[in-house]
Amino acid sequence: MANKKKQIIKVIATILAVVLLFVGSFGGYLLYRFNCDKSSDYGFVSNDYNNIYKQQVPTFDVGDDGEFDVLKINDTHFYNGICEDDKHTLSDLKTILDKTPVDFIVVNGDLVEGFNLKSDYDKYKAIDLFADMIENYNIPWTFAPGNNDGEIDGDNDAIIAFMMEYPHFVYGNSEGIYGDMQLFVDLTYNGKLAHSLAILDSGMRKPKAIGKYEYIQESQINWLLDGINERKVPTSVFFHMPVPSFESAFDNGEACQGFTMYKTYPYTDIPKNVLFDDMTKDNEYISLISCAHQHSNNMCSFYEGRWYQLSSVSGYSAGRDDFIIPSVTLTKIDVTADNAKNMYTFEQITA
């Protein structure tokens, strides 16, 4: 009997040792993947992320017609740039850009897939292929980080440093505030400041890939409000994860004619972003809040003096409901308009 107990204990101990070895090895591998930066595999990357703090506010002149066209691309979730879904996405984006002249491009988060352990996952190859395509059009472009972009194989600051190598990439941040990318883009008309675009980092998850969503922090909102109130011109704000007021705008706002509206699940999945709503609700200069993140939701509504616009996915590698066809959003801004409602024209474009 004693021998049998010893054998059982030995078997259990062996099983536990194997389990611990596996957990330890896999855990170590996860720690490596979460913390490594594979952008160093690309020899052309030489930029230090800290150079972002030295960047001056970019300024663009608006043409005589007073119109400035912004193309928003979001939730492409590129996997490696060469899988079939990614090639389909790149082909569609090229087709759209070939037929759609624009002044500026906002990549509004989740450009690449998040947590993924497959050996052929390569977000930097995907970013390189995407950026090379954009660069061919000589259009300035920028990036608002999403919740997935920096989950593995390099944080958002590594991605941004990678993008800083491309000549038309527009970037900026301010020291002492939360997030990896915050900047204003100023638009002048007849020699005067007429409109601004504001780009914000709306956070990731804590801990990465498995935790709760982050939210836009007070330091960021104060930075935004300070910049807006200094400029005193209408401002279009772009960030990835929406604020709860999108739900009210969808239910109670005036829908943009011709823009397909979907609410497949609530617009309130980042409840702590109510801080953004509370701190900005009385600001008279915010004329547009433009978001993404909710793959099968789609909306554009005028509500309480400003536009709320959220776009469904732009990429075939992104999870979505069957009725969603990947698209981009064209926002035409009339900087001569005297009110927010008449300032914008929105169009959803597919290939």
Image (cartoon, grey):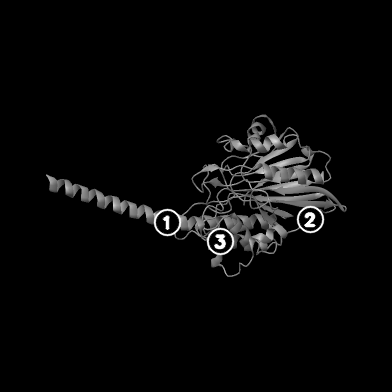
1 and 3 marks in contact (CB < 8 Å): no
Q: Quadrant of residue 155?
A: bottom right
Q: Which residue is mark 3?
A: 124
Specify which label sits upstream in the sequence, 1 or 3: 1
**Of the residues shown, which amino acid type is indicated by label 1?**
Gly
Circle 2: is it few (<14), some (14-19), or many (20+) Cα within 10 Å? few
SS of the residue at dot 2? strand
> Residues under labels 3 and 2: Cα distance?
29 Å
Q: Which residue is mark 1?
A: 28
SS of the residue at dot 1? helix
Which residue is nearer to you in this view: 327 or 207? 207
Specify which label sits upstream in the sequence, 1 or 2: 1
**Of the residues shown, which amino acid type is indicated by label 2?**
Thr
Q: Which residue is mark 2?
A: 59
Left or right: 173, with 78 as reference point: right
> Residues under labels 1 and 2: Cα distance?
46 Å
> Does 256 sit above or below residue 95?
above
